[in-house]
Image (tube, rainbow, N blue to C red):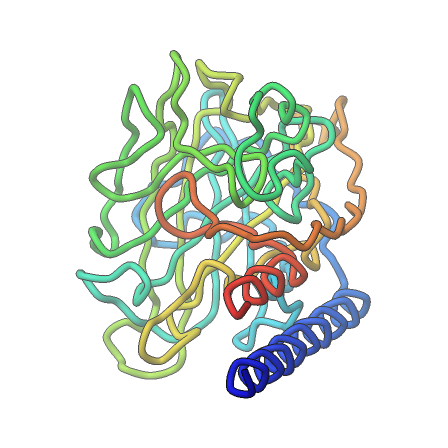
């Protein structure tokens, strides 16, 4: 009928416009990515005095700071409030991080999306990519039928912290048996793609991350200040299946993600709206130097190719709880929207 023909053509035009819009966004992201300068390495030095996890940065005054740009994982757009600062030390048992992210304060005890969130990522499998949380091609829309097919793409997602159940300046500890942190929602996870992410869940699983956070201008009601995330993790863990194993004299490929609570004034952050280091695709070499300032086992920093995913119906990134560290490519999102429209 005329009505159905008209509705069909109207729908097709709308779908075409949506696809063109996402293609344009993808091109802008690639252009921004091409202009981005990625931090190559972070030097983590040995210490005999471990910092206290309380959000007070005075423990770190003598430690070298490294700055990295943050760009949208999907868009490639620059984080508007400035660069991430990272400091790192380690002792015989643990590695310690200080992450400082500039930006205005927001907090809500009922909604994680109205609080800041963060996560680290470390390479485990030899083919694992920063982009798309490992980037296993067999897990492009869901976990692979045989999980071992994606072992070479596995990444360790640690200290994945959503803050609504926590308080500033309080140290939150480890837990056994699972990567899920039921108290502070500071989860220890692994993934092979945005659609295949889980809390650590093998026989030796645990959550070895500790942390405290605060905002430097939480009481001033201004747009100034920075979020401070002071974190630690044991160098080695009982599970090599879900955790990257760290040691002095070794380098590990590393990345960081941040969810801005002001991404949307009403709803806060979204999974796909977060910011990442490495200009979307590049690992940073986390170098735990020995007493002579060297690493004996290096992790070369390579730019991972951005692979296009076939345009099929795309489910919502799931597995694990809360924010997804690195969203799917623009073509995947466009395919999902196109399928919904049609």
Residue at the spot 41% in from the left edge and 52% down from the top edge: 323
- Quadrant assignment, res 34: bottom right
* As drawn, 339 above or below 206: below
Q: Position of residue 279 (x, y in %)?
A: 70, 59
Q: Position of residue 140 (x, y in %)?
A: 62, 42
Q: Position of residue 15 (x, y in %)?
A: 61, 75
* As drawn, 65 above or below 123: below
Q: Quadrant of the C terminus?
A: bottom right
* As drawn, 317 above or below 76: above
Query: Is 92 left or right of 24, judged from the image as shown?
Result: left
* As drawn, 128 above or below 27: above
Q: Quadrant of the N terminus?
A: bottom right
Query: Is 1 left or right of 67, judged from the image as shown?
Result: left
Residue 337 in view here: yes
Query: Is 337 left or right of 285, judged from the image as shown?
Result: left
Extreme-front residue of the structure: 1
- Quadrant assignment, res 133: top right
Front-lying residue, 203 or 143: 143
Q: Position of residue 198 (x, y in %)?
A: 43, 33
Residue at the spot 66% in from the left edge and 78% down from the top edge: 21
Residue at the spot 63% in from the left edge and 23% down from the top edge: 151
Residue 291 in view here: no
Q: How many marks?
A: 0
Query: Is 168 left or right of 38, judged from the image as shown?
Result: left
Residue at the spot 27% in from the left edge and 26% down from the top edge: 175
């Amino acid at each position: 009928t005329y009505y159905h023909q008209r509705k069909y053509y109207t729908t097709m035009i709308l779908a075409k416009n949506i696809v063109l819009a996402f293609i344009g966004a993808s091109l802008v992201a690639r252009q921004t990515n091409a202009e981005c300068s990625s931090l190559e390495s972070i030097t983590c030095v040995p210490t005999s005095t471990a910092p206290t996890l309380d959000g007070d940065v005075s423990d770190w005054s003598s430690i070298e700071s490294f700055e990295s740009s943050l760009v949208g994982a999907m868009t490639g757009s620059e984080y508007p409030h400035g660069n991430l600062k990272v400091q790192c030390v380690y002792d015989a048992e643990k590695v310690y991080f200080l992450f400082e992210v500039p930006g205005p304060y927001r907090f809500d005890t009922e909604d994680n999306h109205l609080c800041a969130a963060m996560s680290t990522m470390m390479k485990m499998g030899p083919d694992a990519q920063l982009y798309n949380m490992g980037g296993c091609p067999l897990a492009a829309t869901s976990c692979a039928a045989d999980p071992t097919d994606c072992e070479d793409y596995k990444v360790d997602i640690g200290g994945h912290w959503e803050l609504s159940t926590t308080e500033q300046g309080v140290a939150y500890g480890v837990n056994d048996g699972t990567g899920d942190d039921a108290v502070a929602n500071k989860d220890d996870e692994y993934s092979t793609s945005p659609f295949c992410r889980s809390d650590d869940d093998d026989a030796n699983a645990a959550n070895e991350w500790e942390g405290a956070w605060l905002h430097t201008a939480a009481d001033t009601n201004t747009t100034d200040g920075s979020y401070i995330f002071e974190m630690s993790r044991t160098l080695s863990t009982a599970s090599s299946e879900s955790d990257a194993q760290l040691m002095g004299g070794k380098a590990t490929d590393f990345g960081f993600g941040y969810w801005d609570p002001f991404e949307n004034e009403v709803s806060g952050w979204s999974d796909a709206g977060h910011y990442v280091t490495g200009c979307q695709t590049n690992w940073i070499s986390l170098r735990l130097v020995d007493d002579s300032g060297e690493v004996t086992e290096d992790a070369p920093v390579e730019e991972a190719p951005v692979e296009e995913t076939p345009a099929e119906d795309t489910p919502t990134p799931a597995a694990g709880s809360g924010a997804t560290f690195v969203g799917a490519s623009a073509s995947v999102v466009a395919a999902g929207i196109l399928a919904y429209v049609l």
